[in-house]
Amino acid sequence: MHAALIALALGLAWIPAAEAVMVGQITHLSGTLSAKRADGTSKLLAVKSEVAEGDTLNTEAETYARLKFVDGGEVVLRPGTQLKIENYAYNAAKPETDNIVMSMFKGGLRAVTGLIGKRSREKVKFATETATIGIRGTHFGALLCQNDCGGVPTTGGTPPPNGLHVDVTNGAITLSNPAGTVQINAGQFGFVPNPNTPPTIVPPQQGIQVTMPSSIAQNKGSGKGLGKGGTEECKM
């Protein structure tokens, strides 16, 4: 009996642990980027590093990172950003299994949705503490201010208020929280200060636009930019 248990234990010891599902790759990086894996381990990432479902990505000060997902979608992270890839299910032949959920705990990003955002747009969501961003085949920017946007320039000369700021370049997004939902179309800006206040569209002069350094925004392979700024600094 003991011999059988020992044999079983030895057999189980040889069963490999479930491998993380790789969902994308870092294509551009300026600075320090780390990933905390679903199993609790952490590692520093570099250009061509793979990103897995369950990873929480962290950009340090002055770090910009661009990643491309398996469905063609792309995200650029600005400094001081923490983004978790909660779910990323994609099978080119099975649209019914599509599912993307990302949580942005702090910082800001620009995103261009890929095939999932075009064929299953209702299954793509970016969550924050104040509201959830829904996708309508989109290129958009998002900035979450939590007493950490003092260096972000505005037309009024004062830091942007705390809350979630969004801008839309193409397509549309929805901002939703328990207090309400609003659709933000191309060329418009949105803001929601907290989860108990309805999201609103704001005038362009009050809007915050997330742009990125040219070195990170420009895709030399396609010639298409993603939130390119006019200088090597991040302008909002």
Image: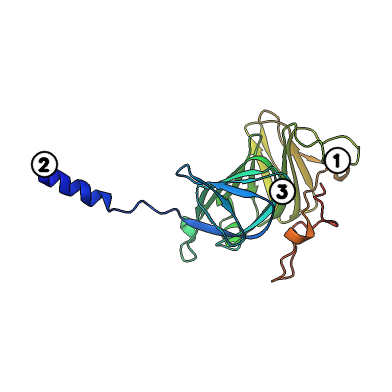
Please state the horizontal and vertical placement of residue 136, each as a whole percent of the image.
Answer: 65, 54
Q: Amino acid at mark 3?
A: Arg
Mark 2 or mark 3: name the one nearer the start of the chain: 2
Q: Secondary structure at mark 3?
A: loop
At mark 2, the secondary structure is helix
Camera-side residue: 203 or 180? 203
Q: Amino acid at mark 2?
A: His
Mark 1 to mark 2: distance in Å? 73 Å
At 74% across and 66% down in the image, what residue appears? 224
Quarter of the figure with the N terminus: top left
Q: CA distance from mark 1 to mark 3?
A: 21 Å
Query: Closer to the observer: label 1 or label 3?
Result: 3
Q: Residue at x 77, y 54 (%)?
A: 212
* Tag count: 3
Residue type indicated by callout 1 = Gln
Can residue 101 be seen here? The reply is: yes
Q: x, y percentage for residue 31?
A: 69, 52
Judged by depth in the image, the label closer to the viewer, 1 or 2, is 2
What element does badge 1 sit on? helix
**Viewer-proximal residue, 199 or 112?**
112
Query: Where does the image place residue 164, in percent across and percent down from the top left?
Result: 72, 38
**Contact, mark 1 vs mark 2 (Cβ under 8 Å):** no
Q: Quadrant of residue 222?
A: bottom right
Q: Earlier in the sequence, mark 1 or mark 2?
A: 2
Q: Which residue is mark 2?
A: 2
